[in-house]
Image (cartoon, helix red, strand yellow):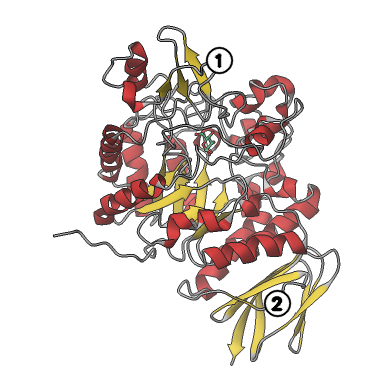
Amino acid sequence: MESTISKDNSGWWDGSIGYEIYIRSFVDSNGDGVGDLPGVTEKLEYLSWLGIDLVWITPFYPSPMADFGYDVSDYCGVDPIFGGLEDFDRLIEEAHRYDLRVIIDLVPNHSSSEHPWFLSSRSSVDDGYRGYYHWRDPAPSGGPPNNWVSHFGGSAWTLDEESEQYYLHLFLPEQPDLNWNNPKVIQEFDEILKYWLDRDIDGFRIDVAQGLVKNMLMPDNPTRFPITEDMSPRQVFAAFDHRYDLDQGGNLEIFRRWRKLVKPYDALLLGEVYLRDNDPNRVSRYVNSGDALHRAFYFAPMHVPWDPQSMWDTFRDALDAAPEDLSWALSSHDDPRAPTRFGEGREGKQRSLAYSTFLFFLPGLPFIYQGDELGLPSIEIQREDLADPVATRNADETDGRDGARSPIPWEKAHELGFTTGTPWIPMGDRTHEDTAEHQRITEGSWLKSYKELIRIRGEYLDPNTSLRWTSSRDSGVLAYRRGDTISALNVDTDDSFILLPEGEWEIVFQVGVVTVEFNEVTFGVNSAAILTLIIE
Ligand code: GLC
């Protein structure tokens, strides 16, 4: 009999608030300057206090760390720098005691070049693992087989001198792309997924979900605009139409398979679907059929400028394309932190909190990136401290991701409590005022506001309600209603207002100046509010 699966993407994650832990920079428990698994376990109480339901932990597997863990050399282990398997098991057990779910980062697009599969694969053209990766003869001209480029700069092909063939890597040469057209690779990953599910995890965040399957004819990608010398790797990558290397239909087949595999475990599949143009119609395909991913990150909100037109375009289109199943994040370990994007200083922080007020009530699964709740901006990083290969391996350092990866300031102590040693990247100009310890006992702190926002969400938002816009596209305020709550954000340069629907409404959470008079709510600049219906 054919196995049946539900075409419904809902589950225990409905109504949850997620939290991204970039493990290297969270808490270091042993003084080596790098965050680790026991460090995460230490802070579960904090996460639970904050009101988090679900944590995503970035890769902790054995790795040469060329891309800080996103280059995996053993998919079923723990790198000693992060602890051991027993630390992992303890973390899961403790998290569950706190009612916190844990999803782990699966990195299927590429392995490390030190993974035994790759070492074997490169040992000979006849090796049994050769087909686990993409090996090709040089082009007739002698250069790389096609014009594909790496996200991190340069060609996506590296020549192996021994065999005189090139291998493909959409990221670093130390991150060779796996061949997802090979059924053996598919089977290997079935086992990897089961291995972790049997260790009681609650799901996976899938790295580079848009990239797995390639067009095996490997034609050149068309260019969208001319490439010039002064472009950064990201700009060069964006100059191509990634018609043949990203977003191939076969990706969905893999996720449908995994969906069946995780079903008995009731685990979540959340994809990083990073498509440069952030076309919501393409991202939504990963969730809309209801039998592939449960949720997909939508990244446009992490790049959108603070103005009504851009905000409307971003959110309206995304929610039209995928009304229920997107995941939203304010910041991440790959992008500048929200308070930096939104203008630095107090204004940047206030805008970020206002923006969170808007994001957290949307249908789907919102995520906080560690430190968002403390109002942290990115740090300035000195040239000699750069660590991210995107910065260190390219002439233009502006693209590096280190600024968003500086460690979390916990308390008044050596290195603000992150480590008893020397942090692997600088703490930046964080002060005691930024620490979780200080903010936890200070009225009006960013941390207290985030905690309150999360509490209000838990109390008033019915996760089973869909979204209806209650302001129009020409308004400076983006407002929507879900059930008996309204969430509204003013991104105008001036005061702006909305008219309330029938009934009596009350503000239950606000950022900045918001006033209600009869059925009219006036929003000061950079303000937001949650309103709830008290009398119909
Ligand atoms: C994802 C990760 C990023 C990593 C890349 C390659 O985009 O979020 O940090 O460098 O994949 O694995």
What residue do we see at 27% from left, 53% from top?
260
Q: Identity of the amino acid at label 2?
A: Ser
On-image quarter of the N terminus: bottom left
Q: Identity of the amino acid at label 1?
A: Ser
Q: Is residue 461 above or below residue 133?
A: below
Q: Which mark is residue 471?
A: 2
Task: Spot the residue most to the top.
Answer: 162
Which of the pair 510/523 is nearer the observer?
Answer: 523
What residue do we see at 40% from left, 24% from top?
80
In the picture, measured across the screen, residue 466 lies left or right of residue 73, that is right
Asked whether residue 156 is in view, the answer is yes
What residue do we see at 56% from left, 40% from top?
242
Q: Earlier in the sequence, mark 2 or mark 1?
A: 1
On-image quarter of the C terminus: bottom right
In the picture, measured across the screen, residue 36 lies left or right of residue 433, that is left
Which of the pair 429/353 is nearer the observer?
Answer: 353
Q: For mark 1, what is the residue? A: 141
Which of the pair 478/404 is nearer the observer?
Answer: 478
**Marks 2 and 1, how far apart at CA:** 58 Å
In the picture, measured across the screen, residue 477 lies left or right of residue 267, that is right
For label 2, count other residues whose C-alpha is less than 10 Å away and answer few (under 14), some (14-19) or many (20+): some
The percent position of residue 490, horizontal first and vertical second, equals 75, 67
Task: Spot the residue most to the left.
Answer: 1
Asked whether residue 366 is in view, the answer is no
Q: Which mark is residue 172?
A: none
The percent position of residue 24, horizontal first and vertical second, equals 52, 32
